Amino acid sequence: MKASVVFFLAAVSFAATSAYAQQQRRGGQQGRGGQSTAREDGLDPTPVDASTNPFVDKYVNDYRNSKPRTVYGNLVFRDILTKLEGPDPLHPTRKGAVLTDISTVSYAALAPGATATGRAPKGDVQIFYAAAGAGKITVNSKSYDIADGTGFTLTPEFDFKLTNTGK
């Protein structure tokens, strides 16, 4: 992946550590099958009930498991989080479908030498963060360099041209 410019649509940032939730409770409280029946955070000692407690593995999708979608010609997006599907945010119907105020948080990549052009859809504001690679964005005849750590926003008011200048 070093050869491509990598962007994170960073409308929301957070950290999820499902590995912590899988650790055995220190007190050794175990149910059927040798699995812990107590909550791992230690704040609520009642047993976990799958019928009433949310299934935490549904909250975040791994971008590598999501179906790629091409936008603006060559910019390939893989969704991590998407709009809530169903009535209950505590029980998402699809992995990563938990957002209520924004539409997506995605991983996007632009191949070496490729160009993406367009305009953000009406009503959208798209926030990008360059996590790797090098590129150039041109808006209103002005060009700006993009490198690791650069962020920019796309709005419907302006056409843009994004180019991966890296190898």
Image (cartoon, helix red, strand yellow):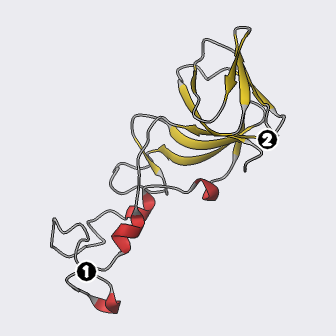
Is 118 situated above or below 50?
A: above
Where on the picture, by quarter, is residue 33? Answer: bottom left
Residue 28 position, x and y percent, is: 23, 86
Residue with the most extreme bottom position: 33
The residue carrying pointer 1 sits among few (fewer than 14), some (14 to 19) or many (20 or more) residues within 10 Å by Cα, namely: some
Q: Are marks 1 and 2 in contact (CB under 8 Å)?
A: no
Q: Nearer the viewer, residue 71 or 139?
A: 139
Local secondary structure at mark 1: loop
Residue 151 position, x and y percent, is: 56, 28
Where on the picture, by quarter, is residue 149? Answer: top right
Residue 111, numbered circle? 2
Residue at the image position 40 percent from the left and 65 percent from the top: 18
Is 126 situated above or below 30?
A: above
Residue with the most extreme top position: 141
Badge count: 2
Tell me the mark number nearer the camera, choosing from 1 and 2.
2
Q: Nearer the viewer, residue 92 or 15?
A: 15
Residue at the image position 42 percent from the left and 56 percent from the top: 59
The kind of residue on which mark 2 rests is Ala
Local secondary structure at mark 2: loop
The kind of residue on which mark 1 rests is Thr
Q: Which residue is mark 1?
A: 37
Residue at the image position 32 percent from the left and 62 percent from the top: 54
Q: Is residue 103 left or right of residue 134?
A: left
Q: CA distance from mark 1 to mark 2?
A: 47 Å
Q: Is residue 79 left or right of residue 71?
A: left
Q: Nearer the viewer, residue 131 or 52?
A: 131
Mark closer to the chain start, 1 or 2: 1
Is 126 situated above or below 110?
A: above
Residue 163 position, x and y percent, is: 77, 28
